[in-house]
Amino acid sequence: MEPIFILSLLAAAVFMLLIIGAPLKPLQWLGYGAIRLLVGALFLFFLNAFASPFDYELPINGVTAAVSGFLGVPGLAALVAIDIWFIP
């Protein structure tokens, strides 16, 4: 399957969850988690976009997206601090 098709389906599912709402509690938790992961990936994307002139890049993967999505800006700052000071 094409990656763009899969991403379109995921975006449509998240959009439907936002508009209609999930009737079941587990689906609400899945929707909440998916939205948080997307927000975390956006945080990382914008960090990489604005930090590229300084030759800094933080990888965008599931773990970093989850940390920055669920913890917000303090989580993103913690990832940057860990990357700068603890990871050579």
Image: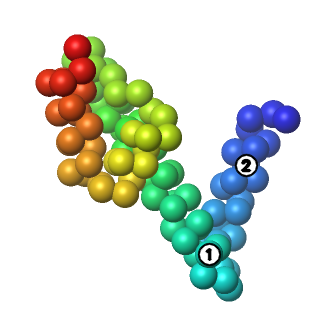
- Quarter residue 49 falls in: top left
Rendered residue at 29%/30% (across/down): 50
Rendered residue at 50%/51% (across/down): 38
Task: Tell me the residue that label 2 is attached to.
Answer: 8
Q: Is residue 21 above or below residue 66?
A: below
Q: Nearer the viewer, mark 1 or mark 2?
A: 1
Q: Are marks 1 and 2 in contact (CB under 8 Å)?
A: no
Cα distance in 3D space between marks 1 and 2: 22 Å
Give the residue type at disc 1: Pro
Rendered residue at 33%/23% (across/down): 57
Q: Position of residue 36 (x, y in %)?
A: 46, 58
Which of the pair 27/54 is nearer the observer? 27
Q: Position of residue 88 (x, y in %)?
A: 23, 14
Task: Tell me the residue that label 1 is attached to.
Answer: 26
| Mark positioned earlier in the residue sequence (1 or 2) | 2
Q: Position of residue 31 (x, y in %)?
A: 58, 67
Give the residue type at disc 2: Ser
> What crowding class fits label 2: few (fewer than 14 Cα within 10 Å), some (14-19), or many (20 or more)?
few
Specify whether 12 is left or right of 30.
right
